[in-house]
Image: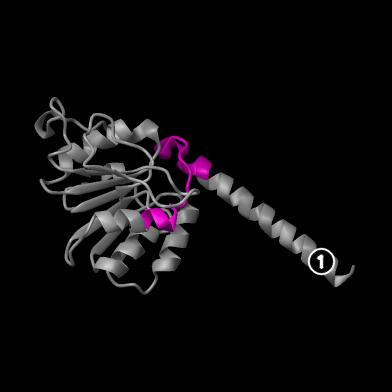
Amino acid sequence: MPTWVVVIFTIIGGAAALKILHALAIVVVHPITQGAMYTSTGRVKIRKALDAVTMKPGELLVDIGCGDGRVLRAARKRYGVSCLGFEINPIAFTKARLLTMGRKGVEIRCRNFWKADLGHADIVSCYLFPDVMRRLGAKLAKELASGARVISFNFPIPGWKHEAVLRADSKLHNDPIYIYRIPDSLSVGFQKTSIQSPEPQ
């Protein structure tokens, strides 16, 4: 068999294997993610968010569902903040660990963030699906300290009042970016003391 045929079949086989692994990764974490898939946030959107939400060295940025860790790496590079990411998709987690290898101040955990206490975070970043945003709002309202800020890419937190809604100067990545602050963003009837975050499934 000619070498070029072997090369083509190898490439096709490798691509097919990656597709299968990607599908399996989604199925494995479906009970927790409820179908949300690993989707990278556009770098132009990350820059827009970081322009608006300034940070100080020593603050902690937590990215829940951090994907490949690009928000964390960008924030660490620009502001020198400590960064912690949670990612349970095995492919995204592996990619994030590889891309942050050797970078001080950036930690990626393969852990369900619903089971983690986020109260030590100064800034929380997320790109989650609408199905879980109300539950997320309850968790963050209960755990985050006064002054903490939240960046939500694409989807708002129901019942919260945004401090700002941003859009990147890009036709391809022009979805909204919602900025919130504790406690100003918590509407009447959404008090920290009365919110009970649902138990993780």
* Quadrant where the image shows the N terminus: bottom right
Residue 108: x percent and y percent?
34, 60
**40 or 175: nearer the eye?**
175
Residue at the bottom extreme, as displayed: 102
Circle 1 is placed at which residue position?
A: 6
Figure check: 126 above or below 10: above
Residue 89: x percent and y percent?
45, 49
**Residue depicted at 39% across the width and 68% down the height:** 100
Dot 1 surroundings within 10 Å: few (below 14), some, or many (20 or more)? few
Residue 56: x percent and y percent?
17, 64
Figure check: 162 above or below 43: above
* Quadrant where the image shows the C terminus: top left
Numbered label tally: 1
Q: Is residue 43 visible?
A: yes
Figure check: 196 above or below 149: above
Give left or right: position of 11 versus 153.
right
Element marked by disc 1: helix
Q: Amino acid at mark 1?
A: Val
Q: Give the colouring mode of the picture.
A: one colour
Q: Is residue 201 visible?
A: no
Quadrant of the rendered structure where residue 179 is?
top left
Please report the bounds of the magenta region as a residue range: 26-46
Residue 122: x percent and y percent?
18, 53
Give left or right: position of 64 versus 159.
right
**Residue depicted at 73% across the width and 57% down the height:** 12
Residue at the top extreme, as displayed: 189
Give left or right: position of 130 versus 124.
right
Verify whether residue 182 appears in magenta. Answer: no
**Residue depicted at 38% across the width and 45% down the height:** 127
